[in-house]
Amino acid sequence: MPAYGDAGLGLLGDPTRRAIFELLARQPSSVQQLADRLPISRPAVSQHLRVLKDGGLVVSRAVGTRRIYQLNPEGVGALHAWLDGVWGDALAMFHKAAEAASQLDDDPGAQQEDP
């Protein structure tokens, strides 16, 4: 399984791949079902699915003569964990900045005036 993080986000940077990802989040679908909902051809949908599958965000299974695609819980979970980590880091930095600003407000002598 490939490493996630910004690689997963990079896969979703393309608007068509993001639309396919969002459709698959709602329900597993065949290439034809996806193509019917998108303004692109079946071959184009297949190419985007291949990229998502190679990136670990999508899996497929055979049902008769068709392949049904769905989100890969492991891949989506790894992307979710990465986003949680980034979000946690951002919140921690915001908290530190808010505390520093609050300390400056509480101690007027600590503020420096511009020359």
Image: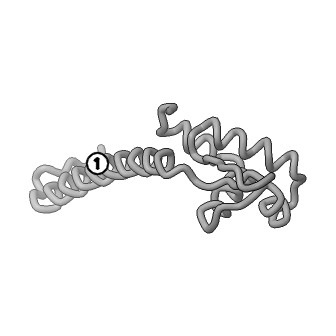
Residue 24: image x %, image y %? 64, 60
Residue 53: image x %, image y %? 64, 41
Kindly identify the residue that appears in the image at 48 percent across and 32 percent down: 3
Displayed quadrant of residue 103: bottom left
Residue 34: image x %, image y %? 78, 60
Name the residue beneath numbered marker 1: 93
Residue 6: image x %, image y %? 51, 38
Count of labels in the image: 1
Q: Secondary structure at mark 1?
A: helix
Tell me if residue 24 comes above or below residue 17 in the rendering. Answer: below
Residue closer to the observer: 27 or 22: 27
* Colour scheme: one colour
Judge the density around disc 1: few (<14), some (14-19), many (≥20) Cα neighbours within 10 Å. few
Q: Is residue 80 left or right of residue 58?
A: left
Q: Is residue 52 left or right of residue 6?
A: right
Displayed quadrant of residue 95: bottom left
Q: Quadrant of the C terminus?
A: top left
Kindly identify the residue that appears in the image at 67 percent across and 53 percent down: 69
Kindly identify the residue that appears in the image at 80 percent across and 52 percent down: 65
| Furthest residue in direction top, as rendered | 2
Residue type, numbered disc 1:
Met
Displayed quadrant of residue 11: top right
| Furthest residue in direction front, as rendered | 64
Kindly identify the residue that appears in the image at 13 percent across and 58 percent down: 108
Q: Is residue 46 left or right of residue 55?
A: right
